[in-house]
Image (spheres, helix red, strand yellow):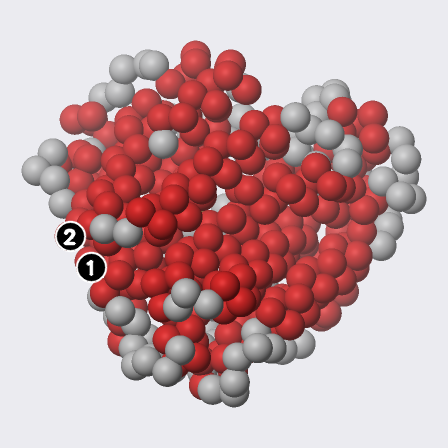
Amino acid sequence: MKLIFDACLLTRPSIRNRVFQPTMFNFLFRPENYFKVEHRSLHLTCRCVTDTIKQNKCWYMQRTRDLHCSNYLYAKDASLPHGFDSHGFDDMSHLHFDIKKILHTNVKPLQTMCSYYFDGNGKHFRPKVVSLVSKLCNEHGGIESKVSESQRKISLIAEMIHVGSLIHDDVVDFSNVRRGKRSVNALCGDHNAVMVGNYVVANASKLLASIGNPEITIIISQIIDDIVRGEFMQQDNKDQFKHYLKKTYKKTASLIANCCKAVASLSSNNNEVIEAAYQYGSNIGMAFQLVDDLLDFVASSKTLGKPSVADLKLGLATAPVLFACDKHPDLHSLILRRFNETGDVEWALEAVYNSSALEETRLLAEQYCKDARLALSMFHESTNKTALLQLTDVVLNRCK
């Protein structure tokens, strides 16, 4: 994981000035002092937009929410579809308890921070996908559909790599909020947050080694390789959709795709089964990120649990902005200069809200969901297959 952080230092030199400053551990780790830490406003400041843009945003937010939430499957107080949330997740019931046990250390500040996001309040999206794919592949091969010990380890590894990368992302992106609460770097400083992320991923690597399968080690190691390459690609802010999609695969979809490939490989030596599992994970991962990019424009910070329009403020062009370029070619120059001039962010927002960019982003996510469902066509009907098919609707219609 040090490679990821080194990549961040190279691509964003300004981080150096923040990372290697002393942290007052004794001060920070007193609960009564958490909110005395200075709240950095960089990249989180809400800019005042013109009345016209605000009206357009409200109109589009309502229109898009009507479109997304008519079958609101992922609302805070709503249940996930039967067969996904309630079906056969006994193997996931102690997920975060087991991860905390793996991460246990006698170094109290490290223990506090490395277990900070493993509080049971996340979506658990990745480990649940991996668990369902494990069961589907097992029953397809005529063996017990129950998740094996090695497959369950892959589910844990998926969540650990994901959280480790989130901790590093918050350092790179200057983010003080994650999952509706203060981020690790906001609590213990950037340097220590990097060490915490390293520690989580290092323990994921130890868990991977315990499986004792060189082929699985190679598959999962590809995820770290992709995350590093994806971070470099993100800094090269090209106004090309192909570049954006490739970057999105590496930073987001690769984790799900390769974990699905790994559990399928543990279940079967049938290349068609392994490829089908990989394609399902890849496509649903791409759809997940596209919806995430869309929600960045239409959902509030409170709903998302993190700052909205964050990517624009970081100088990053996501799918809605790239689609808006078709109607507003002037956006190309803003993308290339990373929206770093006064008024660039506001102009990009106006261009997105006054185009079909949001609808086009959703349509592309729908296509990836369709491809994910198609990847499962070789499997016979079962409750696990039904749950995975329903999951594409959950991803497409989520509102946070």
Residue 171 locus on image (x, y percent): 43, 30
In-image side of 251 versus 135 (left or right):
right
**Can residue 75 be seen?**
no
Q: Which of 238 and 49 is in front in this view?
A: 238
Residue at 34% from the left image edge and 63% from the top image edge: 266
Judge whether residue 347 can be spotted in this image.
yes
Q: Is residue 306 left or right of residue 368?
A: left
Classify mark 2: residues with Cα within 10 Å, few (<14), some (14-19) or many (20+).
Answer: few
Relative to 358, does residue 142 appear above or below in the rendering? below
Q: Name the residue under label 1.
A: 97
Q: Could you say whether the residue bearing mark 2 is in a helix, strand or loop?
A: helix
Instruction: State the image quarter where residue 349 is shown.
Output: top right
Say whether residue 262 is left or right of residue 192: right
- To which residue does mark 2 refer? 101
Looking at the image, which residue sits at the far left?
106
Could you tell me which residue is drawn at 32 percent across and 14 percent down? 21
Q: Where is residue 321 in the image (x, y as percent from the top left)?
A: 76, 42
**At numbered mark 1, what does the secondary structure look like: helix, strand or loop?**
helix
Q: What residue type is labelled 1?
A: Phe
Kindly check if marks 2 and 1 are in contact, taking CB atoms under 8 A apart as contact: yes
- The picture quadrant where one finds residue 16 is top left
Q: Is residue 6 above or below residue 156?
A: above
Q: Residue at x 12, y 36 (%)?
A: 108
Q: How far apart are marks 2 and 1 (CA)?
A: 6 Å
Q: How many labels does the image show?
A: 2
Quarter occupied by the C terminus: bottom right
Looking at the rendered structure, the kind of residue marked 2 is: Lys
Quadrant into which the N terminus falls: top left
